[in-house]
Image (cartoon, rainbow, N blue to C red):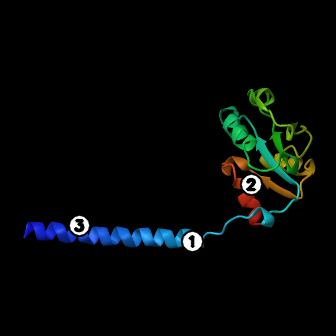
Amino acid sequence: MIEYTVLSVCAFLLIFYLVFLQKIHSGLGKLKYISKKNITNDFISIIIPFRNERENLLNNLRALEALNYPEENFEILYINDSSTDDSVEILKKNITNKNIKILNVPDDFSPNAHKKRAIRFGISNSKGKIIKENIFTFLLERSSLLNLLSRT
């Protein structure tokens, strides 16, 4: 009797697992392939406001430098919003791509707006037709810029 119960449970689990795999296969078949034909050629600006982010900047910089997107089609603007740590120095030492710039928000530019002023300053200094800000919450895979553009 116990063998029959164990065999029944194993058969149920096997059927459940096969249905589960079939649903995954079906779902993967519904995913859209991102064709480079569908990607815009518009120039993109990525704006990254920061203040005292020395622990996070290097990981963010490495992810941005590894993006799988033509370097001449986008710029990355790190906007320093009055950092008091060595964030700016860390960036200056580690930037390797020529499309990455560090800008300092002037003290008299919207003095009470904090992060919003850094974003506004970045937008006013950007060249892109498409602008993405707050990239720290948009942790990047190599193809994430292509994915973002396929939705625009």
Up/down of 142 relative to 151, above or below: above
Instruction: Tell me if 8 is positioned left or right of 83 in this view.
Output: left
Which residue is label 1 attached to? 29
Percent position (x, y) of residue 134? Answer: 74, 50
Numbered label attached to residue 108: none
- Disc 1 crowd rating (10 Å Cα; few below 14, some 14-19, many 20+) is few
Percent position (x, y) of residue 34? Answer: 71, 64
For numbered disc 2, what is the local secondary structure?
Answer: helix
For numbered disc 3, what is the local secondary structure?
Answer: helix
Which residue is label 3 attached to? 10
Q: Nearer the viewer, mark 1 or mark 2?
A: 1
Disc on the earlier residue, 3 or 1:
3
| Whole-number angstrom distance, CA of label 3 to CA of label 2 | 45 Å
Q: Residue at x 16, y 66 (%)?
A: 6
Q: Residue at x 21, y 69 (%)?
A: 9
| Amino acid on which the number 3 mark rests in the picture | Cys
| Whole-number angstrom distance, CA of label 3 to CA of label 1 | 29 Å
- Disc 2 crowd rating (10 Å Cα; few below 14, some 14-19, many 20+) is some
Instruction: Tell me if 94 is positioned left or right of 128 in this view.
Output: left
| Amino acid on which the number 1 mark rests in the picture | Gly
Disc on the earlier residue, 3 or 2:
3
Image quarter hosting the N terminus: bottom left
Q: Nearer the viewer, mark 3 or mark 2?
A: 3
Image quarter hosting the C terminus: bottom right
- Disc 3 crowd rating (10 Å Cα; few below 14, some 14-19, many 20+) is few
Disc on the earlier residue, 1 or 2:
1
Numbered label attached to residue 145: 2
Q: Tag count in the figure?
A: 3
Q: Residue at x 81, y 29 (%)?
A: 92
Instruction: Tell me if 68 is positioned left or right of 75 in this view.
Output: left
| Whole-number angstrom distance, CA of label 1 to CA of label 2 | 23 Å
